[in-house]
Image (tube, rainbow, N blue to C red):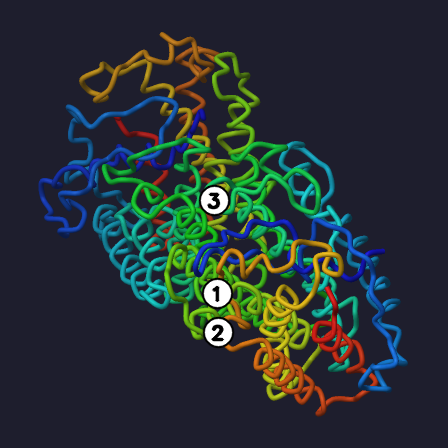
Amino acid sequence: MRSMNLVDAWVQNLSIFKQPCPSKSLVGFIHHPRFEPVFLKSRRRISSHGVSAVLTGEEARVSTQRDDAPFNFNAYVVEKANHVNKALDDAVAVRNPPMIHDAMRYSLLAGGKRVRPMLCIAACEIVGGPQSAAIPAACAVEMIHTMSLIHDDLPCMDNDDLRRGKPTNHKVFGEDVAVLAGDALLAFAFEFMATATTGVAPERILAAVGELAKAIGTEGLVAGQVVDLNCTGDANVGLDTLEFIHIHKTAALLEASVVLGAILGGGSSDQIEKLRTFARKIGLLFQVVDDILDVTKSSEELGKTAGKDLAVDKTTYPKLLGLDKAVEFAEKLNEEAKAQLAGFDPSKAAPLTALADYIAHRQN
Amino acid sequence: MSLLVNPLATTCVKDVHGGRRSRSGLLSTSVKTRISAVYTKEDKNPTWAAFDFKRYMVKKADSVNKALEAVVQMKEPLKIHESMRYSLLAGGKRVRPMLCIAACELVGGEESTAMPAACAVEMIHTMSLMHDDLPCMDNDDLRRGKPTNHKVFGEDVAVLAGDALLSLAFEHVAVATRGSAPERILRALGELAKSIGAEGLVAGQVVDICSEGMAEVGLDHLEFIHLHKTAALLQGSVVMGAILGGAKEEEVERLRKFAKCIGLMFQVVDDILDVTKSSHELGKTAGKDLVADKTTYPKLLGVQKSKEFADDLNREAQEQLLHFDSHKAAPLIAIANYIAYRNN
């Protein structure tokens, strides 16, 4: 299957997760020895060799408009990941029968950057909501992300033996249990969100449930996976199809993460739609920058074989638009994304602003 | 219309000691059976005999089928929708939706309020069968006489179509339910999710898997599997209907108990029939359980005690309904009796 999970590819490139930030020490679990930055296949295999330190102490700080306290993106990401990990651990405790809970926990707590939960929390906070209102939903999106990976790895799908350097779920527990663990995580995501969200009006929780379900079904995640399956082995996939796959397989759940947070945080319809647009822009931005980097960086800088897309004659943004226009397009997307955040309190908007900039300016 | 279904449809039965239990039959068929008389002179309860159960079932199944058809329409990407529809609209008695609607009406709610939930439980039942049929699970080529989903569409699509049905079930209840307060809809969603997850349906399936090849499966173990694999979603259906219909707490709990009893009773009667009826009557190979040395209620308790157990369960189930208006309770009483007295 031609998988395009760009978020994981991005995260893989997020060097704060790869090497110590020179001026900060990150908590242990980020540099857990098991952690290996190989996630879902992107259109290109990205190895971890020779990754240059992108996120230095300076870059980790994004100035807010007020400029009184530069925002520490590193620290923010780590803090949120910690919080979410604890919540996930508590939520999916080992109960009877232990085997299924073990299987669920194996994949869910395998380590992961918790990008989607972070987006959910950041969106909740940007509209003025408390983190606590978003935590169950943040956990839910991570459970769903996890279950989609478990099913994706199955022999009848991508047939992967390893994920993040560890044996995949079905290799450890058997295919039957892996299928069921995925189903159970999907069900539990909804159960948890519906029953554990506190301090939020029921109508909003209901709207959030509907939004999440929609994002992962046949108009979302599954749609992307199915079309991706159809394209396997096809070198001449048009840009429309590529975008369809990307938007549905990757961006849909990202978008839902943001929108869920905004709904649960008490956002107005206008705010929710702005944040939805923001999510779509950064989703596409990942893709474009990915393509550009493949053309412009040397193998060493990227840590992988550059020019691979050209070599295999894949359809990419630089190929279709030319490199200059592709770069312009990326900048435009970044600006448009950040424009959606203009109406919000700048200090609350800082995490999402930092994220957009990071995606746009990453070097690998 | 074949209302009375072959209890042990041709779904896989890995018949070794404590082997995999087939997916229960009221609830999935691949073989048409003769309709045996539902209303005979031996009907125990004259009140419910006057209730036209057959007509009720047909009418509800019709409504549910129409609703399902409307919810899962053909659209792009075509293959996934085709796969979903293939299994969802394959026929089926729509017992779970019917229970959901009946429970809703029992407590004073409207069918229309429960319909999205009724569709949801059928979607979930369907997806669990689709996943169950996969090569890595029961590995069935046929279901209800037709090729299984993965045989037609491929395993990958079958896995995804199942996932899609699961999420659609939640989406549909969340966005399409009318006539019930948001808190209730949320609660119903929570109940649904719980009944099918790692402490519900999936739990039963996993324990069933783990029981394969076990030399001795005790009564507790057997009950665990049945309560989770079969009864849990039945409970979910009934409880959802009750909550959406506006039931009070005690009413919800009574109906939960009702569903648990009939769910378990179904399996017990299944086992008894396998021992006591001829192949001809059953429409399938009788004595299959014995031959395969599967753990069953008659094997553990003997036929007589199993029958008594089934009777006890029926009584306990119907006791829960005594607290409700008997006219409104008629459908549920009829279902309980149908399960208890069926001949195949």
Residue B216, position as x, y percentages in the image: 38, 66
The residue beneath circle 3 is A253
The crowding category of the residue bearing disc 3, from other C-alpha atoms within 10 Å (few below 14, some 14 to 19, many at least 20), is many
Q: Residue at image x 48%, y 46%?
A: B137
Q: Are marks 2 and 1 in contact (CB under 8 Å)?
A: yes
The crowding category of the residue bearing disc 1, from other C-alpha atoms within 10 Å (few below 14, some 14 to 19, many at least 20), is many
The residue beneath circle 1 is B295
Give me the chain letter of mark 3: A
The residue beneath circle 2 is B300
User: Residue B305 versus residue A166: which sits nearer the camera?
Assistant: B305
Give me the chain letter of mark 1: B
- Asked whether, in this view, residue A235 is left or right of residue B316, the answer is left
For label 1, the SS is loop
Identify residue type, mark 2. Answer: Leu
- Mark 3–mark 2 Cα distance, whole angstroms, equals 49 Å
Question: Compared with residue B38, is residue A19 higher up or lower down, i.e. above or below?
Answer: above
